[in-house]
Amino acid sequence: MNQKTLVSTAIEETWTMNNSTVFLGEWCKIFNRKDIWGKINHEVIGYHWNKSEKLIKDIEYIERLIEELTNDLSKSLNFIHNKNYSNQYWKILCGHWLSLFCHSLFDRWETVESALSKKDNYLTNIINIDHSEMVPENIESFVLMCHQDKWNHYIFSEILSSDFFKEKLTFKNIYKIKNDTFSKNPYHPLSPIKKMILNLLKFLNPITSLIRKKQKYLICESYLGKKNEILLNLSLGLLPLTVTPRYQFDSIYDENIRNRIHLSFKPKNNFEKFLIDNLIKHVPLAFIENYKNVLNYVENINWPQNPKVIFTSHFIDNKTIGSLYTAEKKEKGAKLIHGQHGGAYGQNLFHWYESFERSISDKYLTWGWKDYEDKKIVPLGILKTLNEIKKIKYKNNNKIIMIIRPKERYSSTALDTRSRGPQLKKYHEDCLKIGSLIKNTTISKNLIVRLHERKYGWCEEQLWNTQFPDIEIDKGHSPVIQTLQKAKIIIYTYNATGYLELMASNFPVLLQWNVNENINRESCNKFFKELEDVKIFHKTPESLTNHLISINNNVEEWWKSTNTQLAVKNFCNNFAKIESNKIKKIRDLIKNYDN
């Protein structure tokens, strides 16, 4: 049998040009390297979560597993740090990392199993990487690492060379890679204005510290916008906190400490055996070696020392300092009011962030949706400020803006029932299909494709320019509001925050995404059906394009029609409700804990 090369990532040093190649996923084939991989006789393993039934089943399994591991890891961290904190304390601190690590590891494991089930004769090239380089400093660091090629190559190599698979492959070691761009530092350089603000705050710190540390409430990263967040603080008699800190400690991975940590979890299958063998090795340094330093930092931070209430929408999930502060204060009796901070909440059949935030909060503020079985839920309305969008006079504009989603090539975000990174090839093909269908029509000259400033190797600009050399590309570096000011209608191609803001602002928008890869809970399907009936929501590029062509000369008439407006209003009342008194209502919720 001829030997094939099994390739796990886009690192070309691990490829073999003269062998038949099996790529583990589309993430290996970066578009601007097509001149290289296009010359290789290759096949690509189908993504294991393309079948929604498997995704749903796997989510249920992984979530049960994570719940068991959270309890076990909590005991181990209490032991190593000589603490007696609750499971919720460690869940708040470690929950995002633990879930993301387990989701990612399971995804890579299933990918390898899919490839090796074919029983071909495989060679795979493995880069020698020091394990300590692959251990994150904190959750911020891990979020950055897990979508990079080097980390993924390391994880795939660990799986392939484990006792469970190594007999099925031949291995060749590579000792060095060119142009190693791997980074663990999540912080970008500060702009001159931000540096000036931070220096001013440091200067004022001795004065403000005495006041702020005695305050009864902490309001931070509320999603209200700076102006409204300041107003909320002032209405409660608080000195506003407008900047969250950066921190960086020198850390050394200590294998001796980690060897003292033993999980009592009993694995029930090979994946769980591999997971338990590797879990403690990958825990961020901030939770083990550096825990005391981070805790000391939090205990001396210029924030309320004994808050009664913490209100936030984006302070915990991927923020180590915010997570530890919240865990510490909730352990001492503080209440957590957490706000929804994005799209697909209340819609996806499963949404990890929603599930996690609801589980740790005392009150949970949604943008309108309800759950009558959960008394924590407060259907307050959309938290974000929409004034700039509402000011746009879209009927005087002629541009059609298509918004393209940013997404990592690997599955490297906490799970939900939306398209995963490895499915983005099909997503981009659907977007390009819209461009193709518009190409020979009179409206093609008015189309602007808006990319996101975050790029993950999909080479979106080159994808579009290759097929449509004359198309106008917005690279996403300027504020999106500047692009919207040119638009008469927006095409939104994924389920996220932006289209909720547009609909709440009553700005004409068309929606289109693959419903087989974006699975909603039953309770919200009727609202999307109403949007589909008035041709706001579309399941195919063809349907969207046909409608766009038909309304091109009378967008205002279609959007302002009675049926369309009724559907928009009904949808927004449930997922993007306007609440004119939101500052007062949030203030009252906070003050209720004084009684």
Image (cartoon, rainbow, N blue to C red):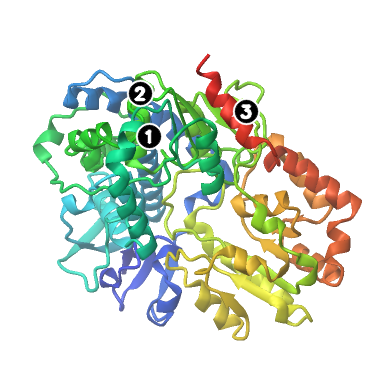
> What amino acid does circle 1 point to?
Gly
For the residue pair 361 and 308, the one nearer the viewer reads as 308
Label 1 vs label 3, nearer the camera? 3
On residue 306, which mark appears? 2
Does residue 225 appear in this view? no
Residue lying farthest to the front in this orientation:
207
> What amino acid does circle 2 point to?
Asn
Q: In the image, what residue occupies the spot 83% across and 58% down?
A: 559
> What amino acid does circle 3 point to?
Val
Does residue 299 appear in this view? yes
Q: Earlier in the sequence, mark 1 or mark 3?
A: 1
Residue lying farthest to the left in this orientation:
256
471 relative to 289 in the view: left or right: right
Neighbours of disc 3 within 10 Å: few (<14), some (14-19), many (20+): some
Q: Secondary structure at mark 2?
A: loop
How far apart marks 2 and 1 lie (CA) works out to 23 Å
Judging by the rendered image, the residue that carries numbered circle 3 is 378
Q: Is residue 318 above or below residue 455?
A: above
On residue 95, which mark appears? 1
How far apart marks 2 and 3 lie (CA) works out to 25 Å
Residue 66 appears at what percent x and percent y? Answer: 39, 31
Neighbours of disc 1 within 10 Å: few (<14), some (14-19), many (20+): many
Q: Earlier in the sequence, mark 2 or mark 3?
A: 2
Label 2 vs label 3, nearer the camera? 2
For the residue pair 145 and 508, the one nearer the viewer reads as 508
Q: In the image, what residue occupies the spot 51% across and 61% down?
A: 406
For the residue pair 204 and 365, the one nearer the viewer reads as 204
